[in-house]
Image (cartoon, rainbow, N blue to C red):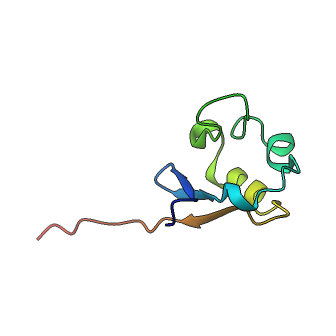
Amino acid sequence: MSESEKTYSNGEITIIWKPGICIHSGKCVQGLREVFNVSARPWINIGGASTDRISKQVEQCPSGALSYVRNKKTTNAAG
């Protein structure tokens, strides 16, 4: 992760925000206010919606400033 990237995770998904390439279209805020709120700090509330809703909204980002990765689930094997 570069210094110009910020990450937000809920354990299932990690949002990556690259502010340097954001064109401020507002699609994220208009589409999912429970998660994206430019008046709040941090402006991304990863707990504000389900992982599926978040991923669908992030996919709408026209500049690619928002992206995500699905985190791998780990299991503990009892030995």
In this rendering, the answer to whether 71 lies above or below 54 is below
Q: Nearer the viewer, residue 75 or 6?
A: 6
Snapshot quadrant of residue 76: bottom left
Q: In the displayed image of the protein, which residue is found farthest to the left?
A: 79
Q: Nearer the viewer, residue 76 or 29?
A: 29
Residue at (57%, 59%) from the top-left corner? 5
Observer able to see residue 55: no
Residue 1 horizontal side relative to residue 28, left or right: left
* Residue 13 in the image, given as x and y percentages of width and height: 55, 58
Residue at (75%, 62%) from the top-left corner? 21
Residue 76 horizontal side relative to residue 54, left or right: left
* Residue 34 in the image, given as x and y percentages of width and height: 72, 35
Observer able to see residue 41: yes
Q: Tell me the quarter of the image containing the C terminus.
A: bottom left
Residue at (55%, 54%) from the top-left corner? 6
In this rendering, the answer to whether 55 lies above or below 78 is above
Residue 59 horizontal side relative to residue 27, left or right: left
Residue at (74%, 58%) from the top-left corner? 58
Q: Nearer the viewer, residue 46 or 62?
A: 62
Residue 78 horizontal side relative to residue 76, left or right: left
* Residue 74 in the image, given as x and y percentages of width and height: 34, 66
Q: In the displayed image of the protein, which residue is found farthest to the top?
A: 39
* Residue 65 in the image, given as x and y percentages of width and height: 72, 61
Snapshot quadrant of residue 32: top right
Count of numbered marks: 0
